[in-house]
Image (cartoon, rainbow, N blue to C red):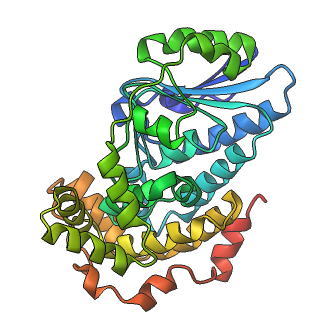
Amino acid sequence: MDQVKDREIRFERQGRAGLITLCRPESLNALSHRMILALTRALLTWAEDPAIEIVVVQAEGRAFCAGGDLMEVYQRRKKGGPPLDFFADEYRLNALIARYPKPYVSLVDGIAMGGGVGLAFHGPTRIMTERAEFAMPEVGIGFFPDVGGTCILSGVKGSYGMYMALTGNRMHWGDALWTELATYAVPSDKLSAFRDDLCETADADTSVRSYAVVPPRETDDATLYAIATHFSRDTLRHVLASLKQAAWRRDEFARQTLMTIKSRSPMSVAVTFAQIAAGAMLTVEEALRMEFRILTRMLRGHDFYEGIRATLIEKDGKPLWRPSRLSDVDPAAVDAHFAPLGEDELVLWNDGR
């Protein structure tokens, strides 16, 4: 089985399981292009291997996976152009996980964001511990919730997914279990024992009975009501107006939420609203195709690279967005993100299919 150079990722057979371990704790297990390709090869091989009855994915360190390797993306752009192949291969991996013919179990014991969400949350069984944090924070770096986030977030009840998408805020295990983003909650100190049982039984629902707990929800009823009220509106303008109206009445949740959204990339927020609003009508495959269309435009734009600069390169935390205000976002520019692919982009998307 493949082993990527520098131990970025490890593939093993344990009992009846194929066990995948992300091994870049110093980089919060960010997915490199090599890791994406190695994961794809392993899953395709194990799908045809009768000795592998279940696939389990875990990670070393304090993060499950903080996302795609943005430094790799940034450097590749400087060397010659947008790294469309990186994302095309990642999206194909997400689609493979979503349709995988064998049980696929993710053990999320730490941060799961961006690409880590795509790796963990398309499978049917998502285990989260008290150390887990779920987020799709892309609007904060001038991007959008990709890797199938369209389907993942649009399906979260109570408009909580739209709230997560437009703010980039984090979710913990109690809320994740309530929203059904997590299938089960297992304490971190029991996760290794559960994994070992799972690899022997190849049956998550049976093995988890001795380990699962039901943590309390972190978000109170009043906040859930506010989220459902504000984020169920049919346009972004109406969402913002609802928040502004509540903020004028000295509603602290509305005030803080509005401030958060205004700090994000205005173009990303506008595109993300349209993306998530469309998500309920799409299959995972359809959503990923739509996301690839958005991606090709984002990679030719300004805000994504500016967000990476401000967050990871210079780390000044002061991105200069274009445009700088939500009121200045051109609806036609938002619509252009969803336009059909060009011929070269279409060839790249269809490569290997």
Q: Nearer the viewer, residue 323 or 225?
A: 225
Quarter of the image holding residue 34?
top right
Count of numbered marks: 0
Pick the quarter of the image with the C terminus. bottom right
Q: Position of residue 116 (x, y in %)?
A: 49, 42
Q: Position of residue 340 (x, y in %)?
A: 63, 82
Q: Is residue 11 above or below residue 323?
A: above
Q: Residue at x 18, y 58 (%)?
A: 256
Quarter of the image holding residue 313?
bottom left
Residue 194 visible in the picture: yes
Left or right of residue 77: residue 98: right
Q: Residue at x 43, y 54 (%)?
A: 160
Q: Is residue 263 above or below residue 334?
A: above
Q: Nearer the viewer, residue 214 or 336?
A: 214
Left or right of residue 251: residue 91: right
Q: Residue at x 63, y 29 (%)?
A: 105
Residue 78 visible in the picture: no
Q: Is residue 280 above or below residue 102?
A: below
Quarter of the image holding residue 26?
top left
Pick the quarter of the image with the N terminus. top right
Q: Position of residue 189 (x, y in %)?
A: 42, 11
Q: Position of residue 297 (x, y in %)?
A: 48, 76
Q: Residue at x 87, y 24 (%)?
A: 50
